[in-house]
Image: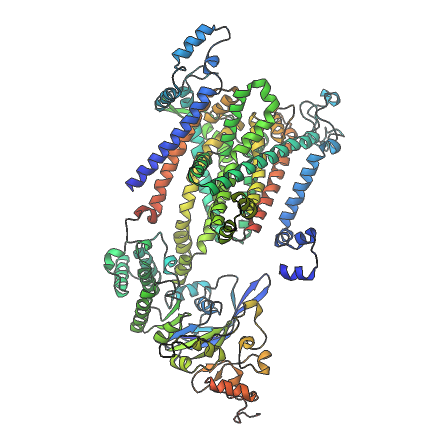
Amino acid sequence: MLAFAIRRLIQAVGVMLVVALISFLLFRFVGDPVNQLVGVDTTPEQRAQLRQDLGLNDPVYVQFGRFVGKAARFDFGISYQIKRPVADLIASRLPATLELSLVSAVFALLVGLPMGVYTGLYPQTLLSRLFLALSLTGISLPTFLIGILLIFIFSVNLGWLPSFGRGDVVTIGGFWTTGLLTRSGLSSLILPAITLGLFQMTLIMRLVRGEMLEVLRTDYIKFARARGLSSRAINFGHALKNTLVPVITITGLQIGSIIAFSIITETVFQWPGMGLLFLQAVQNVDIPIMAAYLLLIAFLFTVINFIVDLLYVAVDPRIRIGGAGA
Amino acid sequence: MTATLSVRNLRVEIPTRHGVLTAIDDLSFDIAPGEVLGVVGESGAGKSITGSAIIGLLDPPGRIAGGEILLGGERIDNLPPPAMRRVRGKRIGMIFQDPLTSLNPLYRIGDQLTQTILTHEKMTARAALDKAERLLVEVGIPAAGARLSSYPHQFSGGMRQRVVIALALAADPELVVADEPTTALDVSVQAQVISLLKRLCKDRGASVMLITHDMGVIAETADRVCVLYAGRLAEIGKVRDVVKHPQHPYTHGLMTAIPSLKGDPDARLEQIPGSMPRLGAIPEGCAFNPRCGFRLERCRAERPAAYPTSRSEASCFLLDAAGRAPPPETATAARAAGIEVRAGAPTGADA
Amino acid sequence: MTDAIRVKEEQPGVLSRILRSDLFYSFRRSPITVISAAVTLVLILAALFAPWIAPHDPFDPASLDIMNSLLPPQWTADGQAGFLLGTDDQGRDVLSTILYGMRISLAVGFASVVLAMALGVTLGLIAGYVGGITDTIIMRVADVQLTFPAILTALLIDGVARALAGPQAYEEIVVFVLVLSIGLSFWVQYARTVRGSVLVEANKEYVLAARLIGLRSSTIMFRHVLPNVVGPVLVIATINLALAIITEATLSFLGVGVPPTQPSLGTLIRIGNDYLFSGEWWVTIFPGITLAILALAVNLLGDWLRDALNPKLR
């Protein structure tokens, strides 16, 4: 178990280094960092001095080492556009994105899982067909379009829910802002969370359904029926537990996707999160923010993958033993 | 005495895109209390489907389209699902072919056993756990108490099939349907598992329906044997009779295809020409007629019933005392093969 | 079945072979698939012939009248004849902009799928056939990229292109950048599938036999291995087409795609989104519906194709 965790950890560090290299190459070679920092009236001598000061004349591997070292201390330099430390900018936006992503993931799981189980158990019923048709629509509708339609219906026409922003937020511990504690914060969260979670929900539903159909065909389910176990014990015990192994994997990976997809949702709802920051950075060629965002996303992905691996082990005894058993 | 299991004119159909296939056609047999009935036939002959039909777990879209199945004299083929569920496991135990896939990999075997016990018997969890341990001891699992908390993948194939047997016997059923219980196992453990199964069922007085394609297993284990061909009964009788004096040309072909230790080691094994028809292409009349060396005119048009002989019962017109006499050379050849040709005998009323 | 039919017909033409194939049978049996195919075809034709069937040329400044801006659809009270689906802020006919916009959406979609397919199939063949360190490198890159959502990869590539080209040049090459960024973010699936098939096929006896009689590796790959992966690759391509169209629309909606002067469906939705609150819903809703129908129809086709070519997966 420990050996497994360590092996996964080493792999994770490897992936992070690769992403760091890409970020570094972006940072160093796409556009000239000096040109971005100084005005047009700067003399060539001043530029050369700055170049020397920034260490841009050092060998590339030294620069990469310095980049990684700084990144490990959350130092990503200064934004070209906003002229503030990138770390501060991201820190101020992080809570909004994480809160939205988490709520969406919970929504996707809480709705998608039961729908998947139902459609897997009763594939022929009218409701199942309806769910399937809805899921296909959910996959075909682009996220931003879903957001626009929700705004059109619930904000513009019905006027029930706000269409942009986070509403009132409360600051906790001096750095974390949350919208979960105020009425306007909660109502502002509903539409973005549904928009962001809908795609993952349909994905989870289709996945659970497929796995459920697969598992229900297995010999051990047939044997369980032959032993006269109740349908409940078979469907929700034996079958569902076996379905969960792949579902955990995919859901875990989807949390990463949700964070990345929040770029779109944040744009539609003008949600003040990291995604919006990143998008503005792409439009303004603000390389330090792009590099930092890339690293951060990769880091979140890696952490999530690691947790998923551990969960996997907790559910499936075949992996847990790792060949140590009989 | 009431038979433990009585199958009457069972008919199983499978609707498909290309029409309705008849997987089991007019099949009847009995299993007496404490008896071991072997069911043999090639793959696709309908052995497993018969087993599934008895326990009420035909894979959809397969369905029972006719006949009756009686357990201890009561019909069970038309029971509502909840009642049938109480029969499964409690009165009929089932053992499947592959022990590697029969156990849920994510549950400890102790949990799988106690869950099964508690489903059918009112007792405390503690008592169920004790019973589970006793069952594991009975099926010969070493250190049974400790192994209750093991997962299936921690057992070898033979050990897993022992666990499966323990699960099938958990609620002391009166009938055990064993569908190729040893096919997936190493040859070395096959005999152990079979003799274990036979001993445990004998101790409990349970009847066994042993489905297999291995005549050796049947010869050693079963009291009677039922031979299926293309979903129909070919022959049924005492094992010794059917093996030594097969009355159906198909059974005869099967028996001569088995190598014998006593016979001439250089003798060539005979084989039946052709192969068993697919379900969609069963010929008119007797299903075996295109491959049969003793075919009569009527074999192409009519279906033979099961005719009794001095030993077994077999579905062949050669045995129909009321039938017209076969051509002399066919009759001679059949008699030479040990078949008690009765067709054309003067005993018939209108011969 | 098919054999029996071939015997009856002396020389089956290509058309009759198609009409009698299992694939066509399952196609005909699924009304939803037939409808999706018809819808896809109609939309593609409409886009192709947009200059002839569009009631107005939305990109001809001379034909635009600012007085006509933000007219509601024709059937509403304030609607005006000639503008079936209303007009946008510049007085452009919404129906015409949709037809022209679909051209760009489809063109970018098809081009990026072709790029992704060419790249993925080639790399997959190489990885599977050459093996060793080449295989490791290609598949490692694929693994790392797979952990990132395609939209993020596309955004990054777009950002890099923007930085390298500068704002002026970027406007000119934006369509190519889109194709490149979408194509580069979808190649992994092809590579994995093809590599898998190559590894399976390479060990089969007929490939061994082909090698024994002295056929060159490249011949074996293209003659024997490639035909085996056509089915799966086609399925991925169809589903990817819907994804690529959605990705292009998303990028354009996010403002990093095609500019408003040559709008795609995504750009149109972005433009219209600004007017949603002031009540001019038609500017964004109609392009949105078109995009949704297009993506849904292509997705349904892909779903059917996957099931038809692989009956085991249901």
Q: Nearer the viewer, residue B73 or A54?
A: A54
In front here: C160 or A182? C160
Q: Position of residue C201 (x, y in %)?
A: 49, 49
Q: Residue furthest bottom?
A: B346
Q: Is residue C102 left or right of residue B343?
A: right
Residue C193 is situated, as x and y percent measured from the top left of the image, at 50, 43
Classify residue B297 by image quadrant: bottom right
Residue A199: % across, % down: 51, 38
The answer to which of C60 and A17 lies nearer the viewer is A17
Residue A10 as seen in the image, left or right of residue C193? left
* B175 versus A51 height, above or below: below
The reply to whether residue B91 is in sight is yes
In the rendered image, the vertical position of residue A78 relative to residue A254, given as above or below: above
Of the pair A325 and A14, the residue shown nearer to us: A14
Q: Residue furthest front?
A: C214
**Residue C288 image position (x, y, % from top left):** 62, 33
Residue B339 visible to an observer of this rendering: no
The residue under the point 52% across, 48% down is C214
Q: Where, quadrant-wise, is the C terminus of chain B in this rendering?
A: bottom right
Rendered image quadrant of residue B244: bottom left
Q: Is residue C200 above or below residue C259?
A: below
How many numbered callouts?
0
The answer to whether residue B278 is left or right of residue C46 is left
* Quadrant of the frame with the N terminus of chain B: bottom left
What's the colour scheme? rainbow
